[in-house]
Image (tube, rainbow, N blue to C red):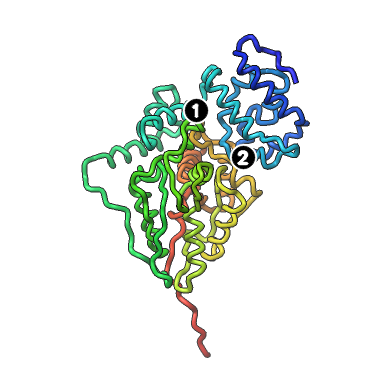
Amino acid sequence: MAVAADTDAYPQAVIDEFKLLADECSICYQCGTCTSSCPSGRELYRGPRRLVRLILAGEIEAVLKSDDLWRCTECGTCTEVCRMDIDVAAVLSRLRKIEREHGGAISCPERTAADVAAARLRRHPRIDNMQFGVAMMAKGHFPKDKVGAAETGIKIAKQMLPRRRKRPAGEAGPASEGVATLPFYAGCALPQDHELHALVHEVAAGFGVRLDEAADAGCCGHPSRGAVASHYASAERVYTACPACDASLEEAGVEAVPLWDALTARAGRSPAMALRAAAPAFVPYVGCLADRDAALAALGEAAEQAGVTMEVDYPTLHNGCCGALGGMYRGATKAGARLLEFAAEKHAPVVTTCVLCRDNLHSAARELKIDVPVHFWPEFFRAEEHVSEERTDD
């Protein structure tokens, strides 16, 4: 298929690549399944379907100026659902590479965040949240939730004061199988919140699990959106606290397992242990980068063990994108708003397996003035000693 609409403005390499993309996408019949299945679908102006249509029409400039290229979170859903077996996610990835090299540097939070993260990771093993925020503001992107941003900044600044930091630890809980040691990959964000970091270790210890955390583990690479490879490598299975880390490590060849799934399974196997929840019901949120069906099923298993209700509306609502790295700068997403409204209707908190999702949804709740608590998994679930009910004779 010919690409000829605005070829004079681009080098031959770009024109040739667009011709290849057009050939690969030529069997697309514009059903729209990719866009309707996308966790960011409600937020997109064009979406995968319209971007493919522009590729086929040879509209190179329109494609390379679209924010939608960078609002893609690389979850791969579009490829999974395509009825013509087009690797739509790979097409979008190649378009982002072209835009990086030959585009006009789209001024959107997601594009800027990827550049800031890539610049940092080319020189350092991890993202620094404080420096990341300063760099974003220097490039003209300011947090929508200014109160939340200020609170986070103050918290990070206090943690930087010279004082002895407690090593994350906790006493082993009621585990008949004894204490298990699991290799743990904490990622970039969690270790920078000392209280939450310590809580993860404490909650794991309550399940009879010691987390063996590599102190020098580098970033999984995901924030740089493919510009910088993962800084972490391991030949053994590791347990993680972040769906984005799961996805990136798997791509880098590291077997990754959500820690929360392992803790739930451990409680289910132990007659001495029960799962306790902080409320009688909750609304699950697994985010766009988790293995969505498996993640919802795992939260459902935790709810069943704890004897609480998991409130589910329509399944895709619970993985609609929170905004990811651009969320705090763009503001509440439509998916996030609908999820919070549903939780408010049910008078139930939201529970998520991702720190970034928690923070973005919390900011969205504040922005939209919706009074719904948002909890990270270990803030909601804990292990406790199982007390069997003995029968009594009247």
Disc 1 versus disc 2: distance between alpha carbons?
A: 21 Å
Kind of residue at badge 1: Pro
Q: In this orientation, which residue lies closer to the viewer: 103 or 201?
A: 103
Q: Is residue 229 visible?
A: yes
Q: Position of residue 144 (x, y in %)?
A: 46, 31
Q: Residues within 10 Å of mark 1 (few under 14, many from 20)?
A: many
Mark 2 lies on a secondary structure that is: loop
Q: Nearer the viewer, mark 1 or mark 2?
A: 2
| The image quarter in which residue 73 lies | top right
Where 384 sits versus 105, above or below?
Answer: below
| The image quarter in which residue 171 lies | bottom left
Q: In this orientation, which residue lies closer to the viewer: 299 or 69?
A: 69
- In the picture, measured across the screen, residue 143 lies left or right of residue 74, that is left
Q: Is residue 371 visible?
A: no
Q: Residue at 55%, 48% (x, y): give it.
A: 286
Q: In this orientation, which residue lies closer to the viewer: 32 or 216?
A: 216
Q: Residue at 48%, 77% (x, y): give it.
A: 388
Outermost residue on the bottom side: it is 394
Q: Which mark is residue 109?
A: 1
First reached walking from the N terminus: tag 1 or tag 2: 2
Q: Position of residue 312 (x, y in %)?
A: 62, 53
Q: Position of residue 262 (x, y in %)?
A: 49, 59
Kind of residue at badge 2: Gly
Q: Quadrant of the N terminus?
A: top right
| The image quarter in which residue 281 lies | bottom right
Q: Residue at 44%, 29% (x, y): give it.
A: 118
Q: Residues within 10 Å of mark 2 (few under 14, many from 20)?
A: some
Q: Which mark is residue 209?
A: none
Mark 1 lies on a secondary structure that is: helix
Q: Position of residue 123 (x, y in %)?
A: 36, 30
Outermost residue on the top side: it is 8
Q: State the residue position of label 2.
A: 76
